[in-house]
Each structure stands twice: as C-alpha cells, then as structure tokens.
Image (cartoon, rainbow, N blue to C red):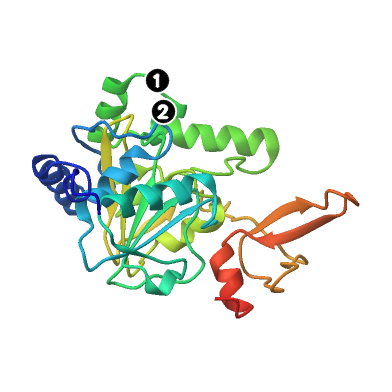
C-alpha cells in the first residue's frame, strides 16, 4: 500500500457517505439511492460507481476478485485490481469461492455465491425506464406511483413485431413486487441468479450517481406475461471446447486461421477450475 494515499484511496468522509447510501439501498431493495459520486483516477465508463462501492466496503481481511464480461484478465479487470491493490494491499484471487468481494462488469459468476460474499456490479444506466421515458423527473414519478405501463407496452410491442421479447441484456426485473430494476448489462442468462440468492448484490452507477441493491433471499422476477414466460439464452447442442460444459453461458468465437466457429465459457475462472488449471 502506498502511504501517500488514504486506505482504499477515498477519504473517510466519502466512504461513510457511500456506506450510508448503500445501507438505504439495502433497506429498500431495487430503489435507486442518489449519492455524491467522487472523482477517481479512472475514466468514466470504467465502472467508477462499482469501484467506489468496493473502495468504501473493502477492509484488510477481504479477498478481491474482479471480472469483466466473465474474464479475470481483461484490461478493465486487471487495471481495477492493480488500482485497488495499490491503495489497500488486499489479497486478490481468480477463484470465485475464495473472494469476499467480487466486482464485475456484464456477468455474474457461474458458481453460486455464498451469504458471506458481496457482488458489486458496474452499471452504466441504472434507470430501467430510460428506454421508454427520457426525463428523470417523469421516471421518478412513475416509480413512486408504480406506473410501469409503458414498460409493459414495450415488451408487448416486441412480442407483436418479432414474436419474442428482443431485449438481450439489461432485461428489467421486478424486485419484491414493487420496483422495476435494471440488473446492469448482464445477459438474460444471469437474471435468474438474482432471485432468492444467498449473497448481497450491490449496483453502482458513478456517472448517474445512483446506488441500488438486492439483499439475500429477495424476490427478483424478470418481467414476462402469464402466457409468454421469460426465456433466457439457450445453448442447447453447444458446449465449451475447453471444458465441455453445456450448462454455462458460452461466448461464440471464431478461429482466426480456419474461420471455424466454436464456443467457450464466458466465465474463464470457472472453466479453468473445471479443467483443474487453478
């Protein structure tokens, strides 16, 4: 840890303010809590909201894991790990089971998380109603009145036009029958992992200055009609070329030489664990 910086970079007042906003978010699942987003030595769009949550919660005894679209070795994940390690000296890991705090962008790990783990998600657009209403003051009123008719109309129009709901990521969820929530840009495949989960999910949007949460054992239902149930991505008949998994989220890839298409686990550490590499 560099002694020229405060522990976990942020000053103690900033961390307390972020923790207070986090406690309110935990108390009202799915509700977007405003907070004073701080400046960080990382460009906007690199997950500053998620990083601020991690920095305000992390302690010397924590073990940190950072993933980006399932990978521990992407530029985003590696640089966030370096930054947090530079100002905390906490232990880092690629194993999901070893981590106490997991910061992620666009994926939820394949391994079910425990009650003593926290998953921090980086969120670019926290407002789920933004695709149907651009004005912030109007979306706040819609949430307050539980007026979600425009969102249901959007889903209905998609069904009429295409025969299915075409939202591939950021698929809206209803939390505890009260608030519609944006689960961040995770694929629909990961949505069911939010329902009645054992771990605490925290969502941070630095640019939009919002924090929201899903606490353990919370009802999180992806929006769907009674006669047209929610469907996640199907990889039937496909498997990972490395570990042979058929029940994980797979990335479609192409061989640069032959042009042949193949599939590989998005969660790289899970794939390595299955193969006994880590």
The quadrant where residue 116 appears: bottom left
Provide residue 118's location: percent of width, then percent of height. Answer: 31, 62
Task: Residue at 41%, 74% (x, y): give it.
Answer: 97
Q: Closer to the camera, 5 or 25?
A: 5
Tell me whether the residue at label 2 lies in contact with that at label 1, contact meaning CB atoms closer than 8 angstroms.
yes
In the image, is residue 132 above or below residue 47?
above
Residue that label 2 marks: 130
Label 1 crowd (10 A; few <14 / some 14-19 / many >=20): few
- Of helix, strand and loop, which one carries label 2? helix
Task: Residue at 44%, 69% (x, y): give it.
Answer: 96
Residue ranking furthest to the right: 258
Task: Residue at 13%, 40% (x, y): give it.
Answer: 14
Q: Quadrant of the N terminus?
A: bottom left
Q: Closer to the camera, 220 or 157?
A: 220
Q: Is residue 155 left or right of residue 147?
A: right
Label of residue 171 in the image: none
Can residue 210 be seen here? yes
- Of helix, strand and loop, which one carries label 1? loop
Q: Closer to the camera, 66 or 137?
A: 66
Residue that label 1 marks: 134
The quadrant where residue 99 appears: bottom left
Task: Residue at 33%, 45% (x, y): give it.
Answer: 50
Q: Closer to the camera, 24 or 221?
A: 24
Provide residue 28's location: percent of width, then percent of height. Answer: 19, 49
In the image, is residue 96 above or below residue 177?
below
Q: Is residue 237 left or right of residue 223?
A: right
């Amino acid at each position: 840890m560099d002694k020229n910086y405060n522990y976990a970079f942020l000053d103690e007042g900033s961390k307390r303010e972020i923790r207070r906003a986090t406690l309110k978010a935990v108390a009202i699942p799915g509700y977007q809590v405003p907070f004073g987003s701080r400046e960080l030595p990382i460009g906007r769009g690199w997950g500053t909201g998620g990083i601020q949550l991690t920095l305000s919660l992390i302690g010397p005894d924590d073990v940190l894991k950072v993933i980006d679209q399932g990978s521990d070795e992407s530029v985003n994940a590696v640089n966030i790990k370096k930054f947090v390690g530079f100002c905390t000296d906490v232990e880092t890991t690629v194993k999901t089971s070893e981590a106490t705090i997991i910061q992620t962008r666009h994926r939820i790990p394949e391994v079910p998380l425990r009650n003593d783990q926290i998953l921090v998600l980086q969120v670019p657009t926290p407002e789920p109603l933004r695709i149907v209403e651009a004005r912030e003051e109007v979306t706040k009123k819609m949430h307050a009145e539980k007026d979600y008719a425009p969102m249901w109309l959007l889903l209905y129009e998609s069904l009429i036009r295409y025969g299915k709901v075409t939202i591939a990521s950021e698929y809206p969820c209803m939390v505890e029958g009260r608030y519609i929530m944006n689960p961040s840009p995770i694929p629909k495949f990961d949505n069911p992992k939010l329902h009645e989960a054992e771990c605490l999910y925290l969502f941070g949007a630095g640019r939009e200055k919002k924090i929201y949460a899903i606490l353990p054992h919370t009802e999180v239902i992806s929006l769907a009609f009674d006669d047209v149930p929610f469907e996640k991505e199907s990889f039937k008949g496909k498997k990972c070329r490395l570990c042979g998994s058929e029940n994980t989220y797979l990335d479609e890839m192409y061989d640069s030489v032959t042009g042949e298409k193949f599939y590989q686990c998005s969660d790289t550490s899970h794939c390595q664990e299955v193969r006994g590499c880590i």
